Image (tube, helix red, strand yellow):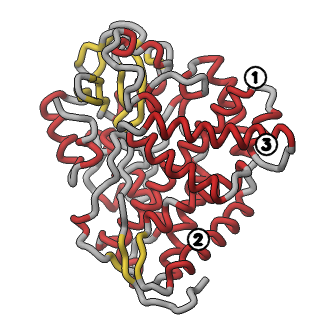
């Protein structure tokens, strides 16, 4: 059985997906951790079927048969990403719609012009901090910090709290031995901010959540914060990192730095197709025995939405890059009731971060061979662990 992590952590995960397709078709049985299997759904149309049929494929992890039977222990590293939580991710139907409204209202309240200017300033300050060295890691020193600063600003966290959140989230998304501790620390930080805002309200999303009529009590407010911050931080970091990698390594996009034809928006869309921020999205749970993609699905089986694999489904491609350029029919944001609520601010942050780096570091170049870049360990995302670069040093920095 192929581990799910093989579709995110190996040098060429698309080869792994093609192998799975040959052996299984569009729905393959994979291993989440030793002894714990699930269905990886790789077909574009099959992913849409699952995402749109919540009466058959539930987000409520309490329906997961392997957990009910004790195959998945309570302290599993999969817990923070797959176990049930009392939030919008773990709800279906009317309950999901109730818990979704505060998120949609929060995103709708974001002042995009203010956010763009704020992110642009953050990016300039980060570049200035390493510009005098002539080298940097554009993941650790740039891409991972920008979303954290932007999100901290929205929720009223200070910079130190933002850095603590970043470390906790990295452990959470790794789904390894330290994921449960990362999750505990993450919720502890957010709980402190929430209680501070109960005493002293402010113009931030934490205060908006506390006052929202659809959130009942501190637990639901906290879990709404957990959903928005965890999803935004990891996925935006990955999108920025993968777009910068593409601009620095792919001749079609690297040429942009020297007047080439494909620019940042093209690179953003290419990443959403080929290496979306969430490679594999956990999870749906079958509410009855059924059939999908030629496979018999048992009640309680877990199904992982292979968003990257579905985007690569040959049935939805023409094979002509010139025709497909600019096509945004990818599934990077998911689909159905649980579609991502914040693609617009995510694109704003990512585009600003990439453009600012390329503008302030006009001769930036990768410091290692492209094949030496490796992803951070995670079965869910495929973010480069580092992106070491060289550029002309500018004493004192520039902004």
| Cα distance between the residues tagged 2 and 3 | 28 Å
Mark 1 Cα-neighbour bin, 10 Å: few <14, some 14–19, many ≥20: few
Mark drawn on residue 386: none
The answer to whether residue 266 of the structure is visible from this angle is: no
| Cα distance between the residues tagged 1 and 3 | 18 Å
Q: Is residue 43 left or right of residue 211?
A: left
Residue topped by disc 1 = 216
Q: Viewer-nearest of labels 1 and 3?
A: 3
Q: Is residue 399 left or right of residue 382?
A: right
Q: In the rendering, at what x and y percent does residue 257 appear?
A: 41, 80
Residue topped by disc 3 = 196
- Relative vertical location of residue 81 with respect to residue 355 in this rendering, above or below: above
Mark 3 Cα-neighbour bin, 10 Å: few <14, some 14–19, many ≥20: some
Residue topped by disc 2 = 123
Q: In the rendering, at what x and y percent does residue 264 appear?
A: 47, 68
Q: In the rendering, at what x and y percent does residue 33 appear?
A: 27, 30
- Relative vertical location of residue 133 with respect to residue 286 in this rendering, above or below: below
**Is label 2 in a helix, a strand or a loop?**
helix
């Amino acid at each position: 059985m192929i581990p799910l992590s093989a579709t995110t952590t190996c040098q060429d995960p698309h080869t792994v997906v093609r192998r799975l397709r040959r052996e299984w078709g569009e729905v393959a049985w994979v291993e989440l951790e030793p002894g714990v299997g699930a269905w990886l759904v790789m077909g574009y149309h099959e992913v849409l079927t699952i995402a749109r049929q919540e009466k058959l494929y539930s987000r409520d992890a309490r329906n997961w048969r392997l957990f009910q039977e004790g195959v998945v222990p309570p302290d599993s590293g999969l817990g923070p990403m797959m176990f049930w939580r009392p939030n919008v991710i773990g709800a279906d139907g009317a309950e999901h719609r109730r818990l979704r409204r505060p998120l949609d209202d929060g995103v709708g309240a974001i002042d995009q012009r203010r956010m763009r200017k704020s992110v642009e300033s953050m990016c300039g300050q980060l570049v200035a901090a390493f510009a005098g060295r002539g080298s940097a890691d554009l993941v650790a020193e740039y891409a991972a910090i920008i979303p954290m600063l932007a999100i901290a600003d929205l929720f009223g966290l200070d910079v130190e709290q933002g850095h603590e959140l970043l470390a906790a989230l990295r452990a959470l998304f790794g789904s390894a031995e330290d994921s449960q501790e990362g999750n505990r620390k993450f919720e502890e930080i957010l709980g402190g901010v929430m209680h501070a805002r109960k005493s002293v309200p402010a113009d931030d999303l934490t205060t908006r959540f506390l006052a929202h009529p659809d959130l009942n009590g501190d637990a639901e407010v906290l879990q709404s914060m957990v959903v928005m911050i965890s999803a935004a931080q990891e996925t935006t970091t990955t999108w920025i990192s993968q777009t910068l990698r593409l601009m620095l390594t792919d001749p079609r996009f690297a040429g942009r730095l020297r007047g080439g034809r494909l620019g940042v928006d093209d690179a953003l869309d290419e990443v959403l197709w080929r290496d979306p921020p969430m490679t594999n999205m956990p999870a749906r749970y079958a509410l009855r025995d059924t059939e999908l993609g030629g496979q018999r699905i048992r009640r309680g089986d877990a199904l992982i939405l292979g968003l990257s694999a579905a985007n690569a489904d040959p049935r939805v491609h023409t094979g002509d890059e010139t025709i497909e350029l600019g096509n945004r029919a990818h599934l990077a944001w998911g689909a159905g009731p649980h579609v991502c609520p914040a693609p617009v601010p995510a694109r704003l942050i990512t585009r600003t971060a990439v453009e600012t780096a390329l503008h302030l570091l006009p001769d930036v170049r990768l410091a290692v061979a492209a094949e030496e870049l490796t992803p951070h360990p995670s079965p869910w995302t495929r973010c480069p662990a580092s992106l070491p670069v060289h550029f002309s040093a500018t004493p004192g920095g520039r902004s």
